[in-house]
Image (cartoon, rainbow, N blue to C red):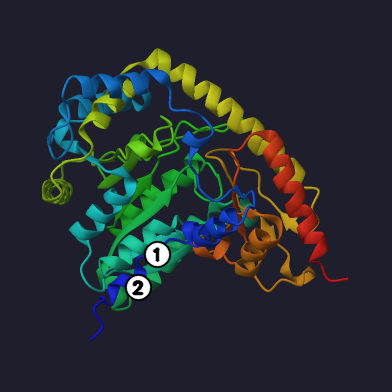
Amino acid sequence: MNILSKRSRFASNPIHEEDDLAERLKRSGRNIIKLSTGDPAVYFPTPKYIIKAYIEALREGRTYYSRAEGTEALVDAVSSRYRRMYRIDLNQKDIIVTQGLSEALYFINSSIIDEGNTAFIFRPYYPAYMSNLYLCGGRCALGDYDEGRGWSIDVQKAAASIKRLKKTSRGKGLKYIIITNPNNPTGTVLQKKALEDIVSLANESGLLLISDEIYDEIIFNNARFTSVSKLAAGIPHMILNGASKNFDATGFRIGFVIIPESDPQSEKIKEKIGEYAKVRLSSNTPAEFACAEAMNNVVEHRRSIRYMVAQISDRVNHAVKLLDENSHIDTVRPNGAFYLFPKVDFGRMRLKDDVDFAKKLLLEESLQVTRGSGFGSPGHIRIVSLAPKKILEYAIDRINQFCIKNSKR
């Protein structure tokens, strides 16, 4: 008897698949430079005022099970943030706190996906979109961010795909469209017009629109961010966000789902996700109080985020400049988040593909990156550009030399 379920094969994460090898190399005495995990807290310590608030919550005995959908303190802080930043009004019931966005994705898919239902996902995608969908018995239909257009979305092409899909048996179970803005892994910030077209597409197709906006304050190069929450009034939609990136608190595991509309469909989803939250009892209570302070203390947050974004912008742009010297690699300059997603010209190299590239780079150069095929885009690699410039300079020099060494003579 096979004790494991069939769905358990989907419990994997390409971002971490080389971790065991990296750890073995590290134990053997190798110094591994890890450019694979998007964890800002490793390089930018969580702001002291947030740490102080966490400690204060512990001292005040806030170590109990709290309200399953989120403490009133945090829910109100999220509501205030969205009113302040995007001029939208949210009720407490519109916001559900989760243990990071991974749990949010699980709650969403568990609530609305039945066996064989479909989600429309643009690639390259964040891998957890797929794993959570598959673990809930769902299937995906794929659209594409267009690399030739700066990783924007060809909405007309997506509309044609959805129209064709709806004529099939799979299309009858099509439930939602999900986008990521700013994007992981490309760092693209979608323009307002593209977002308006996506909102219209979701509305005309009768699909729930989900917008993952967890990097919404990590914007640079004069890019402008627009939240879907400002464009989708009257249309069923969700916003995903959290404390991990903007508030530099990845280990706190605080995310939240925002469902602003009050139509019957949205109300049912709010209720059901809230019930899933009750099943797991509560999120991290002291972390919720700390994150409430993180959002409410606007002066301290602005100081922290401005510094972090200035540093990230400098590092990302410098890394792109260094990669541009590599004739084997082509990189679209990001305007948000902290990732590079270069395309590798394997036609000029003795390496088989991006899987081969990532593994040999780790073995030969002690650099850990992530294969692009793990994000649905073979032929690419993802580089996290959070490390200090000196480390990035060294790492990208090793990548450039690695490409030369493995090029076809």
Residue farthest toward the top in the current orientation of the protein: 299
Q: Nearer the viewer, residue 100 or 260?
A: 100
| Callout 2 amino acid | Arg
CA gap between label 1 and label 2 equals 7 Å
**Residue 364 image point, x, y percent:** 71, 61
Q: Quadrant of residue 246?
A: top left
Kind of residue sitting beneath label 1: Ser
Indicate which disc residue 12 carries. 1
**Closer to the camera in the image, 30 or 141:** 30
- For disc 1, the neighbor class at 10 Å (few under 14, some 14 to 19, many from 20) is some
Residue at left 17%, top 19%? 60
Residue 330 spot, x, y in % from top left: 72, 54
Quadrant containing the N terminus in the rendered view: bottom left
Please give the residue where the numbered disc 2 appears in the rendered image: 9
Vertical order, 81 against 129 (above or below): above
The reply to whether residue 84 is in sight is no
Q: Are marks 1 and 2 in contact (CB under 8 Å)?
A: yes
Circle 2 residues within 10 Å: few <14, some 14–19, many ≥20:
few
Identity of the residue furthest to the front in this view: 28
Q: Check the image and report above or below for 157 versus 243.
A: below
Please give the label number shown on residue 34: none
Q: Secondary structure at mark 1?
A: loop
Residue at position x 30%, y 53% from top?
A: 105
Determine whether, in the image, residue 226 is placed left or right of residue 234: right
Left/right of residue 118 with respect to residue 277 in the rendered view: right
Q: Residue at x 18, y 57 (%)?
A: 111
Most extreme residue toward the right is 409
**As drawn, which residue projects farthest toward the bottom?**
1
